[in-house]
Image: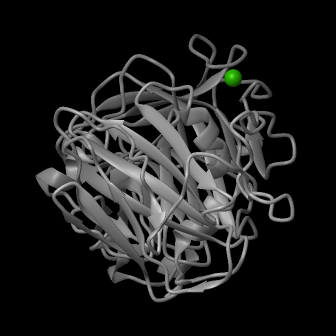
Amino acid sequence: MRVLLPRLLRRPWTAVLTAVVLLASGFTAVSASGSESGCRVDYTVNKWTDGYTARIRITNLGPAIDGWRLTWTYTGDQRVTSAWNATATQTGGSVVAVPANWNGTLATGGTADFGLQGTWQSADPAPSDFALNGTPCGPDGTPPPTTPPTTPPPTTPPPATDCGSAVICSDFEDQTGPAPSGAWQFTAPDCQGTGTAAVDTEVAHSGSRSLRVDGRAGYCNHAFVASTADLSSVGPVMYVRMWVRHTTALPSAHVTFVSLPDTSQAGRSLRVGGQNGALQWNRESDDATLPAQSPAGVALSRPLPTESWQCLRFAIDTTAPGLDTWLGDELIPGLHADGVPTQDVDQQWLARTTPPRPTALRLGWESYGTGDDTLWFDDVTVGSAPIGC
Ligand code: CA
């Protein structure tokens, strides 16, 4: 099985997020390295109340290794609950991570990436005693110049927000009338009711225009505006960014506000919306959700705040099962899928192994029961390269 995460971690966007997280509250990143000891560890943590995820990159500065074992000690009350691209075992504060069956070999200068999810209550200082195969990765020293790190330094600026070369790059300022026109067309994929969509000149994230959708409850109230752009060649990772604003908290019932027709589902849609008050991915063909709608799964997603513009971004891998979702600069742990099933997150999602192949973008509203909302979309981008908020 191919795995998303190592590929995404090598992509500039994700690397830049490592830099960005240094600046945002709730994130910390530490490095431990030593040319004498032969290893470097980059530990980047994203934490919230009671929980965290950590992305860990091992760089081998010594001779090639076939089969690595990384150990460290948590001095707070962190508890690892799951791992991806590695197996992690915790005893007291001591953690041992061993590779999955595809990332155990480390050439000189080579890297291995894996991740953890866990809980904490009162303290969660980053560990400082990483050891690779028993040898400490010391706090001093830097990688040899012949093996530059593949992760840019933390001073790297965030990805450009200018989307000029992207397949979709729309601020809606070229819309001339109240009805979407040109590159954006109203559509009601299955059936149409009282839901409406229009170009709004009162509320905008940029300039003086945005797309407004007045979504109404009930299955036959589909109201979307579809981009006419063909997205079928965007990849291998499709990067989507939009600014979205809405009036009403996501309901407990299932709703959709982004719909991506997907040839891997015979044209049925990959959908972004909400359920149980939090953001959610849904796959139309088998109704799988990401995260699973258990209380633990929902807690790993996030509500979509109301009455303010939110930067929502996706990275959809079209060649391997997996995707990532950011709200602002936060990588949402419950909206992350990779090649390793995680209970309450992507176990159900990965039941279908064919990667998605979205071909188009629709923005709007689709309810399956209850749920009214008014939404605005602006500064929408879809392309093969990461783009910042
Ligand atoms: Ca605008």
**Is residue 259 rendered to the left or right of residue 290?**
right
Q: Quadrant of residue 384?
A: bottom right
Left or right: 341, with 66 as reference point: left
Q: Residue at x 74, y 57 (%)?
A: 143
Q: Quadrant of residue 209?
A: top right
- Give the total number of marks visible in the rendering: 0
Q: Residue at x 56, y 26 (%)?
A: 23
Q: Is residue 127 left or right of residue 156?
A: left
Q: Residue 149 location in percent, x, y?
A: 74, 57
Percent position of residue 284, x then y: 37, 68
Left or right of residue 46: residue 208 = right
Residue 285 can be seen in this image:
no
Ligand 1's quadrant is: top right
Q: Quadrant where the C terminus lies?
A: top right
In depth, the one of 198 and 94 nearer the eye is 94
Depth check: give the residue in front, 338 or 231: 338
Residue at image point 71% right, 63% down:
231
- Please name the colour scheme applied to the rendered image: one colour
| Nearer the observer, 91 or 355 | 91
Instruction: Please say whether residue 182 is visible from this viewpoint.
Output: yes
In the current view of this chain or complex, which residue is farthest to the left? Answer: 295
Taking the view exactly as shown, the residue that stands out farthest to the front is 36
Return the x and y of residue 365 as percentages of the image width and height: 41, 43
In the rendered view, tell whether residue 283 sits above or below residue 256: below
Residue 175 percent across, percent down from the top left: 75, 28
